[in-house]
Image: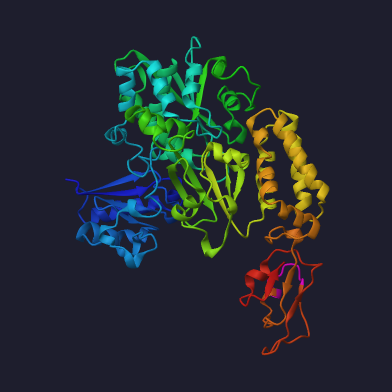
Amino acid sequence: MIRAHVLICGGTGCTSSGSQSIQDAFVEHIAKNGLTDEIKIVQTGCFGLCALGPVVIVHPDGTFYSRVTADDVAEIVSEHLLKGRIVERLVYTDGNEENVDIANLSLNDTAFYKTQNRVVLRNCGVINPEDIDEYIGMDGYAALGKVLTEMTPEDVIQVVTDSGLRGRGGGGFPTGRKWALTAPNKAPQKYVVCNADEGDPGAFMDRSVLEGDPHSIIEAMAICGYAIGATQGYVYVRAEYPIAVRRLAIAIAQAREYGLLGKNIFGSGFDFDLHIRLGAGAFVCGEETALMASIEGKRGEPRPRPPYPAVKGLYESPTCENNVETFANIPQIILRGAEWFASMGTEKSKGTKVFALGGNIENTGLVEIPMGTTLRHIIYDIGGGIPGGKKFKAAQTGGPSGGCIPASLMDTEVDYDNLTAIGCMMGSGGLIVMDEDTCMVDMAKFFLEFTVDESCGKCTPCRVGTKRLLEMLDKITEGKGTLEDIDKLEELCNYIKANSLCGLGQTAPNPVLATLNFFRDEYIAHVVDKKCPAGVCKNLLVFDIDKDKCIGCGMCAKQCPADAITRTDYIAPGHKLASFVIDTDKCVKCGACIGTCKFKAISKK
């Protein structure tokens, strides 16, 4: 009889940190201690708190062990699983070790989890994503059974419409409306497409859902197929996500075996099947028409609209496309009702939103919060604040298509309309946090470099315009810019937004426009004072040695690759050796000297 379950995170983050070796060690030590028939090991998807991985949770206690290594496993097995004594040194205590009763600590009471509302992520970190029975045990496929036996296609579309669910891929188009636009169009074949081509830097929400709960996507796509009259579906997922691809393939095979995909599902006469198409990693294929072209085996380029995919999409047939997170909401909306979903969030942005927290923040990972939660709450209460006591400067939402939210707007309620109102956008859910040491001009350049590289080149405003933008930013960060360049930069941004063919080009200038709006003073400092206030842009930096702090040890000179550091004749009071000086003409500004000096005698200005 099983008396305990050991849940081990098998998401990409923890896997890269060695969670598979931890699982192997558990198998070995559980067998050595004769506990094989009593303890069940479950490899799950992402738990969310990636900063503390690899993560192991022991149930029924709910004990959360963080940063576990294979060397810790023997102790966990012998102490916790065999003797019932929690290994306190490995328990996550939310930073309040002195005030926590470890034996009764509930994970949901921690600051990271307690204000989250996990709808999309409800099964991630809870079930084995490669076992369909575990998904069924969590009400899996009950929603599909309900729509096929109790509801008409019109009923399904109405429920989704009434829920207020909007597309989670970035644009926020009402999901029910998209389904309603596709349903009436008659054709011999109609399609459902799931966009899992998550390509924003720092975004890993959709990948984690596919890794942790792939059956929820299969179920939702089948429901969509029934609602719009489609019998074929495609999941377009990056080949860069091998764990997600493998688990999705396993889930599809299991669903077919159980009769949940294929012919005559639930004896209803409804047929629906799914196929996986691998993307090569082109960011532009996140745009729905480019994605469909790629599925067809063509070059991934967008096409003008109309006609819209609802009328003429994949293989020139009516097609409904949603992203992973959008689909993951559908089964719960069907089971719990439109009013339940609409009770969360704000008036125009219903439900929850998953964010991938990254950058300069303590608790990197996945969070799911009700729409309308403030940025301050996300960063400080859930995210644990900025490391090293640094000040929060800005948060980039929407990746290279989004914009930055400055510290002055930290109390903004995060939803589609509020972000749009301040010149940002929700995007798919990447949230990159930046501290006081971030140069906002350099940050804009980073995202633009990505966009230039990822542009398909089909339209001139995007292909040429973004390249010219990048050249201007390079000029400014090299200290060669002028105030006139800032005006030209803004003018070109607005032209590209207005004239590009697809969403990639239309939103490419957003990081530049947002930083110009909120941090124009930094641009001015770069072109007028020839200084980078954050000390990031190398061409504008000057490295200097404080001769009174320098003890003359010479370690900086030994590390300098350009022989730019030489000894002077000056001996500071209290020191025995002469200090050093940096020849600014020879200095390559690599920063090796600062990293070497233990006495903080070297600074960059």
Across and down, in percent, residue 385 comes to: 49, 58
**Color theme of the render:** rainbow
- Whether the magenta-drawn stretch holds residue 51 is answered as no
Position of residue 3 relative to residue 286, above or below, is below
Check the picture and name the quadrant holding the N terminus: top left
The residue sitting at 44% across, 30% down in the picture is 327
Residue lying furthest left? 1
Residue 601: where, in percent of width, then height?
Answer: 67, 76
What secondary structure characterizes most of the magenta part?
loop
Using the image as rendered, state which of residue 466 and residue 112 is in the foreground.
112
Question: What percent of the width, then of the height, locates residue 249?
Answer: 42, 31
Say which of 92 and 244 sits in front. Answer: 92
As drawn, 203 above or below 337:
below
Residue 110, horizontal then vertical, whole percent: 36, 55
21 vs 409, left or right, is left
Report the residue at 57% width, 41% height from top.
419
Q: In this view, which residue lies farthest toward the front?
A: 347
384 relative to 374, above or below: below
Whether residue 24 is visible to the viewer of this picture, yes or no, is no
Residue 601 relative to residue 145: left or right: right
Q: Which quadrant of the rendered structure holds the C terminus?
A: bottom right
The stretch in magenta equals: 557-564
Q: How many marks?
A: 0
- Residue 453 visible somewhere in the drawing: yes
Tell me where residue 600 sits by quadrant: bottom right
Residue 559: in magenta span: yes
Q: On the picture, is 163 further left or further right than 335?
A: right
